[in-house]
Amino acid sequence: MKKVEYKTTKELKLLTDKNRTEITSFIKKLKKKKPKNLDNIVHNLHDEAFAEFDCLDCANCCKTIGPRLSGKDIERLSKHLKMKTSDFMSQYIITDEDNDFVFKNHPCPFLLPDNYCLVYESRPKACREYPHTNRKRFYQILELSHKNCETCPVVFDIFRELIKIT
Ligand code: SF4
Ligand code: SF4
């Protein structure tokens, strides 16, 4: 896999649109007949990509999408910031159209100008797991990952590589 290069979300959206038909038919093909070792292939691509690509040079996810937060995330973050949970909620959290807790604003209120995360050790579980390319049963999140191609340059390149090699 070639070294991943940073792309803005605007560039990624254009590229994802340009490749939409190809990626959609690739997903259909995978759903019909999933390669047995799909998780291994994707995990290897993930490791290869992130060995060379530094999220601090990107932060597209923190700038544009933001995580869903669980009750535990909210408790942990309030504690980290030495705030009452109720104050933390009113300052930072809203519920979205699916009734999930999300940050009020984008970029994330805890994203620092150098792309470091102010609450890194206590960050939400969804932030730790994004972009999900090292999770088990990748075939269950093919559509979500297609959507993530518009935000994450690593996910976009993993799809490009998967199409080439599977
Ligand atoms: S996970 Fe993806 S979108 Fe987020 S900072 Fe890393 S490369 Fe960028
Ligand atoms: S909490 Fe940290 S990792 Fe999560 S979106 Fe905000 S800045 Fe990014």
Image (tube, grey):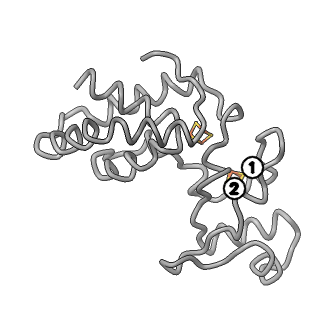
Question: Looking at numbered disc 2 in the image, what kind of residue is underneath it?
Answer: Arg
Where residue 52 appears, as percent x and y from the top left, is 59, 20
Res 107 quadrant in image: bottom right
Q: Quadrant of residue 5?
A: top right
Q: Amino acid at mark 1?
A: Tyr
Q: Which residue is mark 2?
A: 123
Mark 1 lies within 8 Å of ligand 2 (Cβ measured): yes
Q: Secondary structure at mark 2?
A: loop
Residues at circles 1 and 2 in contact by the CB criterion of under 8 Å? yes
Q: Is residue 55 left or right of residue 161?
A: right
Residue furthest right in the image: 82
The one nearer the camera, 111 or 79, is 111
Give the percent coordinates (x, y) of residue 46: 46, 30
User: Which residue lies most toward the top here?
Assistant: 2
The image quadrant that residue 69 belongs to is bottom right
Q: Residue at x 82, y 63 (%)?
A: 80
Residue at the image position 76 percent from the left and 72 percent from the top: 92
From the viewer's perspective, tell me whether residue 162 is left or right of residue 62. Answer: left
Q: SS at mark 1?
A: helix
Q: From the top left corner, tell me how far across and down residue 3 is, in percent.
A: 52, 17
- Residue 20, above or below 5: below
Residue 120 numbered mark, or none:
1
- Residue 26, horizontal then vertical, whole percent: 22, 37
Q: Is mark 2 within 8 Å of ligand 2?
A: yes
Q: Does 110 appear above or below 160? A: below
On the picture, is 97 further left or further right than 34?
right
Residue at 18% over, 35% down: 36
